[in-house]
């Protein structure tokens, strides 16, 4: 059997990719060498746009029980005095329609995402199955898969391969794709506890700029807490992971009787990116394509943005709606944005060190570095290259704001009504102003015609500037028109 897509690795990126492929009508098979999800949390913060990706794939609702909304994020000195930061007032919802940031429990999120795969008739997930080699042919890829439970092997064929096999990515290496380091490689001790007593610490994300030991601390769902302690020169993982050493660090913040240690492990936070995210029929996604220091919670978020960008494009090519060139826009769009996310996170890490130096008498970090603090002026850019109809408006490349909307008499949010389709969005019913030819072109793409009867907030600002906009299935604003017939 020839699958549309084979996915190597069903960590969070691969599991969401499998769901998205199924939802876009592709047949897919995913393999993971591990028998279950990796049981210890790594990623903890999820931005609003990524919550939106999960929601649009029907994956957010069942993940909410393992999510928590922090009340803000800040940089403080060793005594806890705020140096810079921002508060998320209760109930603050961004134009994407979700809280700015939610903390989540990665194993719980992965289980919930994997469970949804069972609802997709043409998608199968095989655990304890290692992909040991693959070969690219003119119009398909063949994979050799080893069943680690039975010891048997099989050959599987798919038109496309998405490698979500993590930072060590055997697939990336086999493709000979260069892996470029951007220069941040620093060891931190990551400690998770379950709080069994009273949690008196602030319910926000904190970067403690202590020159003795820069420390990140944050509340997590399920009564958990995370600390990340920067290692000093000469400290080793072996020494730092000893429970007595871990408790010595944690007890500065929380008495031992109030917490149970879940894990303590030294991670080297890397900043790396693949030179391309595509090699013919193979695409890299998630940590297989990039690694980001975690200070801005961008690593996994970037991985989920990757597969959200890619799945609909593969589906369009498979349905004959687009040529192969559409798939080249995957690297063109995702690589520059991911590079910026990595650079942004590195600057945030440098700012922690610079504030720590300042508190021991060093210079104040320059404003251009302070811009990378939480709430600072430095923002991640919007899409500016790839499948966009010009750059005449600065709305193009941004995500279309969430809004109350109407589609063919049905009322709901724009996202609920549009699903994973293209959307032609206007204050009036866009179909009325389109001639038959224009309408049938959009219908060929299964586009939804969306009316926004009472625009407000960001949607109002958008529709005051443009009578009509077109959003891609991943919600990126593709183009705009001064009036509907101009479409
Ligand atoms: C301490 C820490 C904090 C972090 N905080 C954040 C955060 O707040 N926000 C954020 O967005 N990100 C964060 N990250 C990053 C995030 O954890 C990773 O980006 C994410 O886990 C990567 O997911 P993935 O699915 O791409 O890769 P992985 O989780 O590494 O999954 C790869 C999968 O591929 C499988 N595999 C590998 N080779 C094969 C093969 N040959 N055959 C079959 N299966 C194979 C593996 O078994 C594994 O399940 C953090 C990371 C760390 C370490």
Image: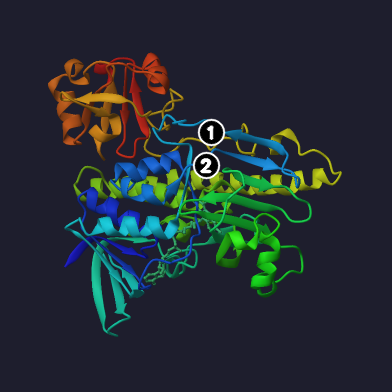
Residue 217 locus on image (x, y percent): 62, 51
For label 1, the residue is 88
Query: Within 8 Å: ligand 1 and the Cβ of disc 2?
Result: no
Residue positioned 44% across, 27% down in the render: 391
Residue positioned 26% across, 24% down in the render: 405
Is residue 157 in view? yes
- Name above or below for residue 201 compared with residue 12: above
**Quarter of the image where one finds residue 16:** bottom left
For label 2, the residue is 70
Name the residue furthest bottom: 151
On screen, residue 332 versus residue 121, left or right, reads right
Residue 264 locus on image (x, y percent): 59, 67
- Name above or below for residue 377 compared with residue 291: above
Residue 303 locus on image (x, y percent): 43, 52
Number of other residues with Cα within 10 Å of mark 1, as a class: few under 14, some 14 to 19, many 20 or more: some
Image quadrant containing the N terminus: bottom left
The colour style of the image is: rainbow
- The answer to whether the residue labelled 2 contacts the one labelled 1, judged by CB atoms less than 8 Å apart, is yes
Residue 439 locus on image (x, y percent): 17, 25
Is residue 331 in view? no
**Quarter of the image where one finds residue 108:** bottom left
């Amino acid at each position: 059997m020839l699958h549309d897509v084979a996915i190597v690795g069903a960590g969070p990126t691969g599991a969401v990719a499998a769901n998205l492929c199924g939802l876009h009508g592709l047949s897919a098979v995913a393999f993971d060498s591990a028998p279950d999800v990796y049981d210890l949390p790594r990623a903890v913060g999820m931005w609003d746009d990524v919550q939106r990706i999960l929601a649009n794939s029907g994956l957010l609702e069942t993940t909410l029980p393992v999510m928590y909304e922090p009340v803000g994020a800040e940089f403080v000195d060793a005594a806890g005095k705020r140096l810079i930061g921002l508060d998320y007032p209760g109930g603050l919802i961004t134009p994407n329609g979700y809280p700015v940031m939610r903390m989540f429990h990665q194993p719980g999120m992965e289980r919930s995402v994997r469970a949804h795969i069972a609802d997709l008739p043409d998608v199968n997930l095989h655990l304890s199955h290692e992909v040991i080699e693959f070969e690219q042919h003119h119009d398909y890829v063949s994979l050799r898969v080893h069943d680690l439970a039975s010891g048997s092997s099989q050959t599987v064929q798919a038109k496309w391969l998405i490698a979500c096999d993590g930072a060590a990515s055997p697939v990336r290496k086999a493709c000979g794709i260069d892996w470029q380091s951007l220069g941040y490689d620093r060891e931190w001790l990551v400690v998770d506890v379950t709080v069994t007593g009273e949690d008196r610490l602030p319910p926000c994300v904190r970067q403690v700029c202590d020159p003795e030991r820069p420390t990140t601390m944050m509340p997590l769902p399920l009564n958990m807490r995370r600390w990340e302690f920067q290692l000093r020169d000469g400290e080793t993982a072996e020494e730092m992971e000893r429970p007595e050493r871990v408790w010595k660090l944690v007890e500065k913040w929380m008495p031992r009787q109030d917490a149970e240690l879940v894990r303590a492990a030294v991670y080297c936070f890397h900043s790396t990116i693949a030179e391309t995210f595509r090699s013919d029929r193979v695409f890299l996604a998630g940590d297989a394509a990039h690694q980001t220091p975690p200070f801005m919670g961008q690593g996994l978020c970037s991985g989920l943005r990757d597969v959200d960008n890619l799945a609909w494009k593969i589906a369009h090519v498979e349905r004959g709606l687009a040529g192969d060139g559409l798939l080249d826009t995957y690297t063109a769009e995702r690589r520059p944005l991911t590079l910026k996310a990595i650079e942004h996170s590195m600057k945030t890490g440098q700012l922690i060190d610079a504030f720590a130096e300042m508190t021991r008498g060093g210079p104040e970090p320059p404003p251009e570095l302070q811009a990378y603090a939480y709430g600072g002026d430095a923002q991640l850019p919007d899409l500016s290259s790839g499948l966009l109809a010009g750059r005449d408006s600065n709305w193009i490349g941004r995500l279309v704001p969430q809004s109350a909307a109407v589609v063919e008499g049905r009322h709901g949010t724009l996202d609920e009504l549009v699903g994973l389709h293209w959307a032609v969005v206007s204050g009036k019913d866009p179909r009325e102003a389109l001639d038959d030819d224009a309408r049938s072109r959009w219908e060929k793409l299964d586009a939804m015609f969306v009316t926004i009867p009472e625009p407000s907030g960001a949607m109002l600002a958008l529709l005051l500037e443009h009578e009509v906009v077109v959003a891609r299935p991943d919600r990126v604003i593709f183009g705009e028109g001064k009036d509907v017939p101009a479409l």
